[in-house]
Image: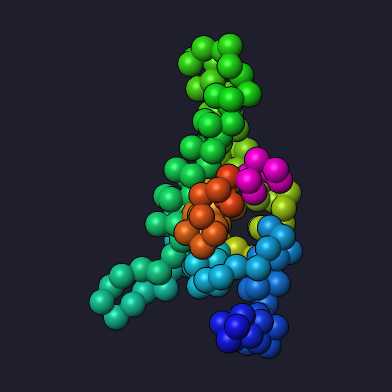
């Protein structure tokens, strides 16, 4: 009971209330671990550097999200096209998970308004929003689980 109350207070009145609002606006749910989503919004070009030299950015979440998106897409195509060969499935998956497609999805849902990036610090500016989308999916996977991420991708994207 107290965990619920504590989360509700943090979500509505805490310093991170704007992040909770953003995730609810973009994806339609309230996260458990808001720190994952805050990290997912920090592109490598705007990395925070710790005293020990480690960089804080969304690259690791991007790596994880990429794998989740590919797995969900592969599973969906395998079920949707039971009579098609591997080559067809691979080509279709490549189109769905392409950088251009992920950038379009990120812009369509409005993620581009919230990504923290240094426009002069990145050589891959055209990838920033797709990268952030992958990072968000990685955060959703860690925070809510694979089934939730699967349903979100299949039903809404």
Q: Is residue 57 left or right of residue 129?
A: left
Is residue 152 in the magenta section?
yes
Q: Position of residue 68 (x, y in %)?
A: 49, 44
The main secondary structure of the magenta stretch is helix
Q: Is residue 28 above or below residue 130?
A: below
| Observer able to see residue 138 | yes
In the rendered image, the quadrant that contains the N terminus is: bottom right
Q: Is residue 51 left or right of residue 115?
A: left
Q: Which of 126/29 is in front?
A: 29
Q: Position of residue 99 (x, y in %)?
A: 55, 39
| Residue positioned most to the front | 1
In the rendered image, the quadrant that contains the C terminus is: top right
Is residue 67 in the magenta section?
no
Residue at left 70%, top 72%? 21
Q: Is residue 29 left or right of residue 63?
A: right
Q: Which of 116/82 is in front?
A: 82
Residue at left 52%, top 71%? 33
Residue at left 44%, top 65%? 57
Q: Which of 111/154 is in front?
A: 154
Q: Is residue 86 above or below residue 63?
A: above
| Observer able to see residue 113 | no
Q: Position of residue 100 (x, y in %)?
A: 60, 38
Q: Which of 61/7 is in front?
A: 7
Q: Is residue 111 above or below residue 36?
A: above
Residue at left 74%, top 64%? 25
Q: Is residue 123 above or below residue 78?
A: below
> Which segment did they paint magenta?
151-157
Q: Position of residue 4 (x, y in %)?
A: 61, 80
């Amino acid at each position: 009971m107290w965990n619920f109350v504590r989360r509700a207070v943090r979500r509505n009145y805490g310093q991170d209330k704007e992040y909770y609002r953003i995730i609810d606006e973009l994806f339609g749910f309230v996260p458990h671990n808001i720190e994952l989503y805050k990290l997912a919004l920090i592109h490598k070009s705007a990395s925070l550097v710790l005293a020990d030299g480690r960089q804080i950015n969304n690259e690791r979440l991007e790596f994880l999200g990429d794998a989740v998106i590919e797995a969900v897409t592969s599973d969906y195509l395998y079920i949707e096209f039971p009579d098609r060969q591997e080559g067809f499935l691979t080509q279709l998956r490549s189109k769905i998970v392409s950088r251009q497609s992920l950038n379009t999805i990120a812009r369509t849902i409005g993620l581009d308004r919230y990504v923290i990036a240094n426009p002069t610090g990145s050589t891959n500016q055209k990838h920033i929003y797709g990268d952030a989308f992958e990072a968000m999916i990685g955060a959703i996977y860690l925070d809510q689980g694979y089934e939730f991420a699967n349903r979100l991708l299949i039903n809404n994207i």
